Image (tube, rainbow, N blue to C red):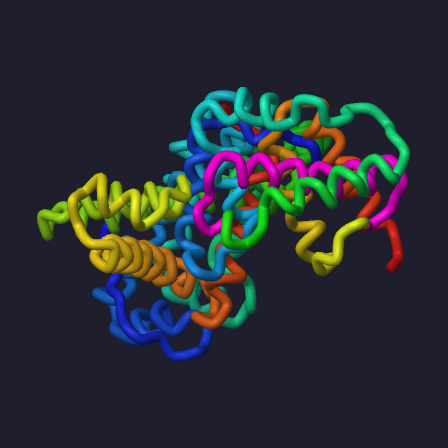
Amino acid sequence: MGERVGTEEQRRAISLLVAMLGDDVKPFELLAAHCASDGADAWVRTALLGVPSKRVPLATWEDLKRHSKRECAPDRIAVADAAAMAGLLRYCVSIAGALCDHGALVSSMPRADVERMLALIGPLLPDPWAEVFAQALSRARAVQV
Amino acid sequence: MATPRSGNFPDTQAVWIGERLGDGAAGLNEVRAFVMTWYREPLVTYSRALGLGVGPRMAPDDLVHGYFASRLADPDYFASWLKSGLRLRHWLKNGLHFFVREEIRRQSAINRVEPSGLNAWEDGVPQADDAAFDKQWAITTLNGASDSARAELTRLGRLGDWDVFWAARARGVSYESLAREHQITVAQARQKVHAVGDRLRNALRDVLVRDGAKPSEVTEDIRRMMEALHGGRDHG
């Protein structure tokens, strides 16, 4: 894991797949389409301004998760505005960070969805986030519930 | 890409190819056309990415052409696939690796290569890489399904519906915004998005089912394709 999804055709293909899921789409899959769109790297860096990119206490990740969850409530995700997407991204980063730094699963999402989210979103992000997600995925697969 | 026929699929694997093989030469030609349309490009790109070939001067295009020429005229080849339980794409990818080894042995016999030289040639053949191939196949298949859906919309004079669909599903634009922008009602915007989504999904479903997926697995297969796009090695 950890390979950057860089080609235009790969990114377009991800957007196509998400578009095809329709009503079955999960919020993090919609986020994937957002991260795969043109200019997403700059958007990601802006959305993650102030988010720790180095090891921090678990409580910091939990605080970020609580705060960002309020920004991406399901009714806002349906609208898919940039602020909601940014909140969802920070929410995903908090899950990745807690797993990466502490091997702790701080989300009530099903484990399979957490692993899928990490595998799907991570390679769409610039470093250092791609690497954080890759390490988190590795730990998620190793950690027993 | 040719537009695959839509319709109701029984919940069994590989029905379409099995039925075509029962139609004799015409059916076999239809199967070959399907394989060449949907699998040639990913096999060529896969061969290029892996450096798969027979000798330094064999281009990936020629390799895949040679493989298809040697196998696809034989109905038993597809009959063997039907018994294999593999997805068609994996059967074809494995077949390509077998073909490369056969060709190496054939050419070494013609050129009277010593056994040690033959071993070196065979050792140089890369191992099969499912992740790399699945990624190429996913990209080609998605582009093909998208092209089919867009071609059909163009034929109907409704290509603008694609923009409405793409804005809603890929960029998350609300139906209300789309209705304002395109001067249609919210209900019409929703209907256009669903109609194009169904068309695209049906185009993809047809290929996935012919590849060996069950119709009930299509949503799961879409998610597997998403994961496949992250796997393997890049070729660009």
Q: Is residue A104 left or right of residue B48?
A: right
Where B49 sits versus B184, above or below? above
Instruction: Write the residue at 46% across / 46% down.
Output: B138
The residue depicted at 47 percent of the width and 70 percent of the height is B214
Q: Quadrant of the C terminus of chain A?
A: bottom right
Magenta region includes residue B176:
no
Q: Of B127 and B211, which appears nearest the observer?
A: B211
Give percent across and percent down for residue B124: 66, 30
Please indicate whether residue B8 sits to the left or right of residue B103 in the image: left
Q: Is residue A89 above or below residue B81?
A: above
Residue nearer the viewer, B131 or A141: A141
Please say if B192 is above or below B172.
below
Q: Please identify the dominant SS of the magenta region.
A: helix
* Residue A95, magenta (yes or no): yes
Q: Position of residue A38 (x, y in %)?
A: 43, 26
Q: Is residue B235 left or right of residue B183?
A: right
The answer, for residue B78, to whether it is visible in the render is yes
Which image quadrant: the N terminus of chain A?
Answer: top right
Residue B66 shows in the view = no
State the image coordinates of residue B33 (x, y, percent, origin top left): 28, 53
Q: Residue at x 42, y 36 (%)?
A: A12
| Residue B209 % position (x, y) | 41, 65
Q: Locate residue B26: give its quadrant.
A: bottom left
Specify start and end residues of the magenta stretch as a single range.
A77-105
Instruction: Name which residue lies at 31% across and 50% down.
Output: B175
Q: Is residue B31 left or right of residue B99?
A: left
